[in-house]
Image: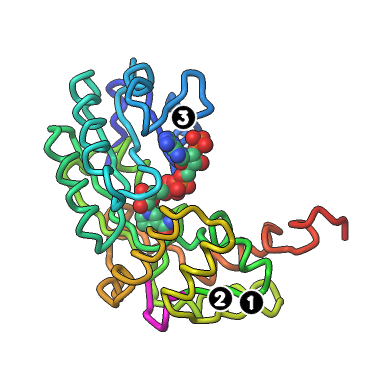
Amino acid sequence: MTYNNSHNPTTLVLGGTGRRVAQRLTALGRPVRIGSRSGEPPFDWQDRATWPGLLEGVGSVYVSYYPDLAVPGAVETVGAFARLAVDRGVPRLVLLAGRGEPETELAEQAVCQSGAELTILRSTWFSQNFSEDYLLDPVLGGEVVLPAGDTPEPFVDADDIADVAVAALTRDGHIGELYELTGPRLLTFAQAVDEIAKATGREIRYVPVSIDEYAAAAASQGVPAEVVELLSYLFSEVLDGRNAHVTNGVQRALGRQPRDFADYARATAASGVWDLAIASGVQP
Ligand SMILES: NC(=O)c1ccc[n+]([C@@H]2O[C@H](COP(=O)([O-])OP(=O)(O)OC[C@H]3O[C@@H](n4cnc5c(N)ncnc54)[C@H](OP(=O)(O)O)[C@@H]3O)[C@@H](O)[C@H]2O)c1
């Protein structure tokens, strides 16, 4: 594959994984604009008036919707954004989506119908949920309580997602592709937590609970109702074994194997993010 250097337009990047994509594009000398509610000008999925300004002078967009393409309203919102982008002369979109979610596939179709030059990254659970998202506090607390049963998932590294996104944004040959992105190995949540315990040298255990117990506990801890609803959906509907197989999406897009969860756990432990003294701000 060759770099498409015929022009060097700005890429608008959205969402948490968008930051990783932005770092990589910047390292390649590509101009980047980050879409953020605190940006100047701001970008807000819930305020369509903020969209046109961000699309000005842009040649491609990395689209990561918040909180999830499966939530009510997402299909309309992300479809409207894609149509606006194409109307404004932005040809190239790379869409991050979830794997095995029928609602999300409707959102993919809505984006596809915009006529954009589209690449879809259909991703499984991110490894980084344990270090950068809602599972970080449970890992620090030594107990990961989830309604995940013993269904295995092929956790994928967010760095691999970003690498595929950058390939799709900068190189020829990815338009029209749908990459299903997984790691190289199936792990249950219990096995994933064991890998983290091994890497940190700390005692951390996985505690399986029912969906109802999980939802009640989350609500009592002040987790917003829509987040409880989304997590309950993901843990019940999507974690039913439908995604319990690895795919070759990373290999197909990048010509290399995806990163294993154990490598993620070792590197993340070494970064100190799971170190209790560092996390609590106490000097060792
Ligand atoms: N986590 C997983 O395991 C997983 C698996 C498969 C697919 N996915 C998909 O990945 C996507 C999210 O992943 P991600 O890591 O890229 O993003 P993310 O980390 O979930 O995105 C968080 C960022 O979104 C921004 N945000 C929040 N509300 C917003 C709004 N109303 N308008 C614009 N931006 C808003 C915030 O940035 P600012 O505060 O700067 O605005 C926030 O930092 C979802 O669509 C999800 O379905 C996730």
3D distance between C-alphas at marks 1 and 3? 35 Å
What is the quadrant of the C terminus in the image? bottom right
> Does the closest atom of ligand 1 sit within 8 Å of the Cβ of label 3?
yes
Residue 99 appears in the figure: yes
**Of residues 228 and 278, the one drawn nearer to the viewer in this rendering:** 228
Tag 2: residue type? Answer: Val
**Of residues 189 and 163, the one drawn nearer to the viewer in this rendering:** 189
Proximity of marks 2 and 1: CB atoms separated by less than 8 Å: yes
Circle 3 residue: 34
Checking the image for residue 169, the label placed there is none
> Does the closest atom of ligand 1 sit within 8 Å of the Cβ of label 2?
no
Earlier along the polypeptide chain: callout 1 or callout 3? 3
Q: Is residue 25 left or right of residue 3?
A: right
Residue 221, how many percent across, how many down?
59, 61
Circle 2 residue: 193
Residue 224, how many percent across, how many down?
49, 53
Which residue is pictured at 44% across the width and 60% down the height? 228
Quadrant assignment, res 103: bottom left
**Of residues 224 and 160, the one drawn nearer to the viewer in this rendering:** 224
Which residue is pictured at 69% across the width and 80% down the height? 203
Residue 200, how many percent across, how many down?
68, 72
Identify the element where label 3 is drawn: strand
Identify the element where label 1 is drawn: helix
Task: Specify the segment rendered in magenta.
Answer: 147-153
